[in-house]
Image (tube, helix red, strand yellow):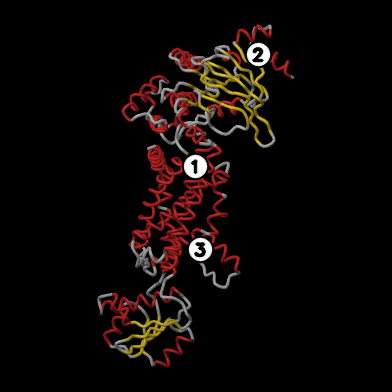
Amino acid sequence: MRTLSLTKRLIKQIVRDRRTVALLFIAPLFILWLLSLVFTANDTKTTFDVIGAPAVVLDKLRETGATVAEVSLEAGKERLAAGETDAYLEFALPKVNVVLEGSDPLANRAVMQTVQMAMQALVPTNGVVKQFLDVTYLHGGSTLTMLDYFAPVLIGFFILFFVFLISGVSFLRERTGGTLERMMATPIRRHEIVFGYFFGFGLFAVLQTTWVQWFTLQVLDVNSVGSFGSVLVVNILIATVALSLGTLLSAFARNELQMVQFIPLVILPQIFLSGLFDLRGMPDWVIWLSKAMPLTHGAEALRGIMIRGDSLADIWMPLVILSGYSLFFLALNIAALRKYRKV
Amino acid sequence: MGYDAVVRVEHLTQRFGKRTILHDISLDLQRGEILGLLGPSGAGKTTLVRAIAGIGEYSEGQIAVLGERMPSLRVVQRIGYMGQADALYQDLNGLDNLTFFSDMYGVSKKRRSSRIEEVLELVQLTPDAKRPVHTYSGGMRRRLSLAIALLHEPDILILDEPTVGVDPVLRKNFWTEFRRLQAIGVSLLITTHVMDEAEHCDRLGLIRDGRLIALGKPSELKEQADSQSMEDVFLHFGGVQA
C-alpha cells in the first residue's frame, strides 16, 4: 500500500518535470537517428559485378541505382580483389553466389540491400530469397549493418543510462532535502521504499523501452527477429540494475553534480566493454572486467533476441546474471537504509 | 520523575566515530506537556530528537516511547515529526505532499481528504493547496511542514526548530496551535535556540556540547540562576558546568 503511494508520487513527479520526460523519450530517438544517418548513408550507391545473370534480374539490379557491370568470373574476382567493386554475384541458378568484399559493413549492407530489393521484386517472400542467396566474404565481415549490430546494445544502454541518472538524482534529492528522513519518521518499511522506487521507475523503463524499440524497428528500420516481449523482459532487468545501482551510489554523492560524475566512472566503461567494440585479442583483465559489467550480459541477451532470434530460454544465462545483480543491489539498498532506521 | 512519561530517555550516549555528540542524557516527556530543548546550534539537540523519533542509531542507553523501546514502527505511527529542513517535494503541490504523507502514515482513504482539509485550514494554506511547493514562501513551507506532522493526529509531536525563519506573527500562531494541541492531550518536544521562546515551555532542558546542563520549569531555572532573562540563565548553567 505504501509502496504503491510512493510509486504514484514518483510518477507524478517525473510527469511534471517536462525536461526529464523529454530526456527519457526524445533524447534516445535523437541519438539513434543521428547514428542511423552516420551508419546508413548512401546505402544504395554501390558498385558490383554480375556473372551470368538473366536479363530480367540485371534490369532489376540496375533499377535500384547501383553501378552494375556484366563481366566474366575471372574479371569479377580480380576487380573485387583490387577493391574496384564491393561484390560480385555469380548466377549458378537456382543458386546465386554473392561474394562480398566484406571489410566494410556499410558496403556489405548496401550490396545486400540492393540484391534483396531486386530479388524481392522477382520473388516476393523474403525467406525464399535468402534460400537462393549463398553469401560469402572475401575478407570476413558480416551481413549485419553497424546499426543492426549496435542497436540492441544501444537500447540497453539508454535504459541503463537514463534510469541510473534519474533514479540516482531523485533518491539523492530525498536524502539531501530531508524527505527521506521524514519518510523514515513514518511507519514505512525500508523495503517498501526500495520497491516503491522499483515500480515507479520500472514503469518509465517499460514505456521508454517500448517507445525506443518501436522507433528503432519501425522508423530506423533496424532488423529484429526476436519477440518484442523478450526484449522488454531483458530491458526491465537492465532497468532494475540501473535503478538499484543509481540509488545505491547516490549515497556517495553529496549533490547532483557528484551524481553526474559517476557517469564516466560507472556508465561509460560499460558501453565500451559491453561488446559494442570487438574485445577479441584484448588482455585477459579487460575481458574479465567486461564480464563483470551488467550491461555486457544485457547486451548479449538483447543481441541474442534481436539478431539471432533467441527465445528467453536460449539466453537464460545472461538473464540469471542480470537478475542476480538486481537482487544483490536491491538487497544492498535495503541494508543501506539501516543507517536511517534500524527497523 | 513523573509517573506518566510518554518519552523516557535514559543515559543516552551518541558517538559518530571518535566524536561524542551526546553525553549520558536522561530526560522524560510527560503526557500533555511542552518540553523545550534550548541550546546553541551544534549542541546536539537535533541528534537527540532524531533518536527519540526513531531515526538514526544511538550508541548507548535506552529510549522508550509510550513504553516501547525505539525504534519501533508501531510507536512511530503515533509520533509527528517535523525536522529542521522543510522536507517537502518541491515539484509537487501542497495537496500532493499531504496526500503522500497521509498514505505513509496509513491514514485511511475515508478519513484522508477530510483530514487534509482540516490541517490545511489549520495552517491557513487552503487557497494555496494546488500550487507547486517551489512557489511557496519560506513561511508557507514551514506551515505545510507542520501540517504534515499533524496529519495522523499523533499523541506526541517532535518539532525540531519549528519557528526558525518564521516571522513574529506566524510564530505566535504556531505557539497558539501548540497550546491548543497541548490542551487536547498531545505531548510536545520542541527544540529552539530562541531564548524568549523557551519561556513558553512548561519545562526546559538546557543543552550544551551534548550535555544536558539543566532541566526544570523556566521559573525554577531563573530562580536558581537568580536572574530574570533566559539568556542569563543559560550563561549561569553553562558557566557552572565549565
Q: Are marks 2 and 1 on the same chain?
A: no
Question: Which chain is disc 3 placed on?
Answer: A
Q: Which mark is residue B8?
A: none
User: What residue lies at 64% left-to-right and 22% top-to-bottom?
Assistant: B40
Question: Which chain is disc 1 placed on?
Answer: A
The residue to which callout 3 is attached is A274
Q: CA distance from mark 2 to mark 1?
A: 41 Å
Q: What's the amino acid at mark 3?
A: Ser
Secondary-structure class at tag 2: helix
Q: What's the amino acid at mark 2?
A: Glu
Of residues B9 and A277, the one drawn nearer to the viewer in this rendering: B9
Of residues A120 and A43, the one drawn nearer to the viewer in this rendering: A120
The residue to which callout 2 is attached is B231
Vertical position of residue B139 compared to residue A171: above or below: above
Q: Are marks 1 and 3 on the same chain?
A: yes
Indicate which disc, 1 or 3, sits on the residue closer to the N terminus. Answer: 1
Using residue B186 as the reference point, say whether residue A219 is left or right of it.
left
